[in-house]
Image (cartoon, rainbow, N blue to C red):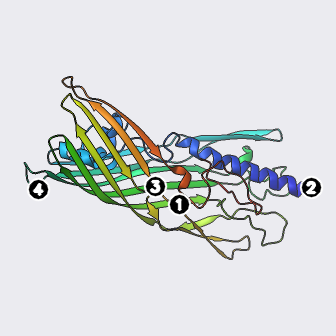
Amino acid sequence: MMDGLRRWSRQGLLLGLVLSLPDFASAQGLQLFGIGPVNRSMGGASTAAPIEAIGALHFNPATLTAHDNQLSVNSEVVSPLVDIDSSFMGRSGQTNSDSGWAAVPAIGLAFKPKPDGPMTIGFGLFGVAGYSVNYPASTTNPILFPQTPPPGSGLTPGVGNVFADVSLLQLAPSIAMKLSDQLSVAAGPTVMAGRLAVTPFPYTAPDDSNGDGVFTYPVVSGTRSAWALGFQVGVFWQGENCVNLGESYKSPQWFQDFEYHGTTERGLPRDFEFRFDYPQIVSLGASYTGIEKWLFATDVRYFDWRNTSDLPGEPAAFGANGAITGLGW
């Protein structure tokens, strides 16, 4: 009975931790709401509001035709300020994540081969999504208790130290064509490089290869970057009444499987694979430029997170083997 309680407590705490990760990057999931400081200052609203090349290349490349030759190079630094607290069987505690600072680069180029020609060529390179948590093991916060507490410690099994890091970088070359004074279209491929590290690894069955009756989730010590391909298209309409409209579609970014190297409780090799595609994104936007020195813009954006993984896009639960079955969104 005690072994069952320990297993239930560890699984319940791990499930709570997984469900807490989307809260760190809510609303748009892992996606940053703006790419680069200029686009971020507009809350990411750029589907029909050509401000600078970076936002245009990510949210609607058709707006490139409204730009002169332009090169934009910048970077942001971010530091996630997150903590986790838990309570179980009369014990409670709070732990801050030691995530540190991370740089998010952004480069955008818009180039017209002919100054008065209809074509604009664009190239973007930017960080589009990510999050990071780094919680040390704890003797006061139940969710971070060791997976196998020392005998006589009075601690219930937790998940130990938790590290998760997701970083996604996108290359976005595009060609935009001005079909008339009002209508522009664009298309281009997208290439992504991604790193998705998480330990302990919750998407596989816990292990008891040493036969002590305590099942633990594997600590994953190695992973590699994966690559993805996709495409994007966009339409931009510049109205004579200073009202502009835009629409864009980014396909799913189809990733290679993410691969991980870990070990069993006995230290023997144990490898894992995990499929995670970046979601398709549909953007609709409108802007108004009828007041001098003012720009009003709004975007509506749909992210299809439900179909991004082998795991269902539903609230996470446990399978019969103890693995978490969902991503929690």
> Where residue 167 is drawn, which disc sits there?
3
Q: CA distance from mark 1 to mark 4?
A: 38 Å
In this rendering, would 87 be left or right of 235?
A: right
Does label 4 or label 2 sit earlier along the sequence? 2
Quarter of the image with the N terminus in it:
bottom right
Query: In which quarter of the view is residue 193 placed?
Result: bottom left
Query: In which quarter of the view is residue 289 placed?
Result: top left
> Where residue 113 is drawn, which disc sits there?
4
The amino acid type, in three-letter code, at marker 3 is: Ser
The amino acid type, in three-letter code, at marker 2 is: Met
Callout 3: few (<14), some (14-19), or many (20+) C-alpha neighbours within 10 Å?
A: some
Image marks 1 and 2: residues in contact by CB distance under 8 Å: no
The amino acid type, in three-letter code, at marker 4 is: Pro
Q: CA distance from mark 1 to mark 2?
A: 37 Å
Callout 2: few (<14), some (14-19), or many (20+) C-alpha neighbours within 10 Å?
A: few
The residue beneath circle 1 is 276
Image marks 4 and 2: residues in contact by CB distance under 8 Å: no
